[in-house]
Amino acid sequence: MFKVYRGFFFPAVFTLFLAIINPGFITTSSAGTPGNEGKKPDQQITPVRVADVEKKMVYEQISLIGTAEAVAESTVASEVSGIVEYFPAKEGEFVKKGQLIVKLSSEETNLRIKGAEAQREKIKESLLYAEKELGRFTKLKETNSIASNKYDEILYNYNALTQELKRSEADIERLLYELKRKQVFAPISGFVAKEHTEVGEWVNAGGPVVTLVDLSRIKINVDVPERYAVLLSPGSDVKVSIKSLPGKQFAGKIQAILPSGDSGSRTYPVRIFISNPGMKIKSGMEAAVLFSLDGGKNALLVQKDAVVPAGDNRIVFTVRDGKALPVMVKVLGYYDGNAAVEGDLKPGDKVVIRGNERLRPGQPVMVTE
């Protein structure tokens, strides 16, 4: 095990070790850095970029495979029966909310409406006559000029026609409602995933017409082992990568951790919601979800580019008094481009993140922005 080197003392053994594992440590350039001509190799000034060592809370992370699924999927049905007359919706096409997707033949309904309207007019005429009769018999009753049962008969006839008119108007309203429902409109914006009918087919009331899929938001379903499920919380942030969209990462949140798991696999379903700009993510795609588990710990963080392999070990170069000094570290894990490390470091120390590939212990360096 190597010790951490500080100050200006650089044992030849360590230099020899670095030279064996990385010959670049002893390779020099005849040109060098401007202003370094004529200097000894170990005196050449190397430009480097540095970053601070930080101490932050880190959380154990796990990556699990899940499946993408549309948050909203609707099998649109017709409220009324009829023959399909017009069917503009086609599989794979995008339709907006409120857009016409199917029209049923309305000829028979229109004929029934005309018949109902004619019946209503007939009832109105009968009711008008009954109203006049009721007025006349009411005056006769007041003078006791007619029998009581005759008046009751006229009154009953008038009330019956009044109710019949109401039923007729209700029938017309129902037929108008049915006529309106002969056109089916998209309840949501989305892609037509499946056609359930075609022009000329009979559709029963409640029968499916199309299946719409809204891909503006995606739900990722992941089966999480029970030992990890207890360390997750609804609302926690996650990162999602889609296998078929390399190089892209999507931010999401845990929407729900279902309370009922699979007793065979000892896993629990977890639902994650993510946005889907451009609607590139499709239902059924494979997704890798990076979870941060509850119960974090404080750790020293350096940018991952600061860590340099040294055989089976890892080192970082700190900058002190204009010189690069190696510090042996143990990498505990990687978190969002940073490495959590253990070693002789403290928050605020400057570590080299660019130009550290060919540094030698004690080599003069110049920090650049």
Image: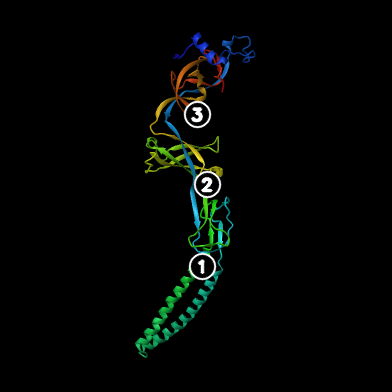
Q: Is residue 10 visible?
A: no
Mark 3 burial class by Cα count in 10 Å: few <14, some 14-19, many 20+: few
Name which residue lies at 44% across and 73% down. Answer: 167
| Amino acid type for the residue under numbered disc 3 | Gly
How far apart are labels 1 and 2 at the CA level?
35 Å
134 displayed left or right of 310: left
Q: Which residue is mark 3?
A: 337
Name the quarter where the C terminus is drawn: top right
Mark 2 burial class by Cα count in 10 Å: few <14, some 14-19, many 20+: many
* Colouring mode (rainbow / by chain / secondary structure / one colour): rainbow
How far apart are labels 3 and 2 at the CA level?
30 Å
Residue 66 in picture, x, y percent from top left = 47, 40
Name the quarter where the N terminus is drawn: top left
Q: Which mark is nearer the camera, 1 or 2? A: 2
Mark number for residue 313?
A: none
Residue 24 in picture, x, y percent from top left = 57, 15
Please name whichever residue, 229 or 65, is drawn nearer the observer in this view of the structure: 65
Give the SS element for disc 3: loop
| Quarter of the figure with residue 137 | bottom left
Q: Which residue is mark 2?
A: 215
Q: Is residue 337 shown above or below 31? A: below
Mark 3 or mark 1: name the one nearer the start of the chain: 1
| Quarter of the figure with residue 292 | top left
Name which residue lies at 45% across and 75% down. Answer: 165
Mark 3 or mark 2: name the one nearer the start of the chain: 2
Q: Which residue is mark 1?
A: 176
Give the SS element for disc 2: strand
Residue 325 in picture, x, y percent from top left = 50, 15
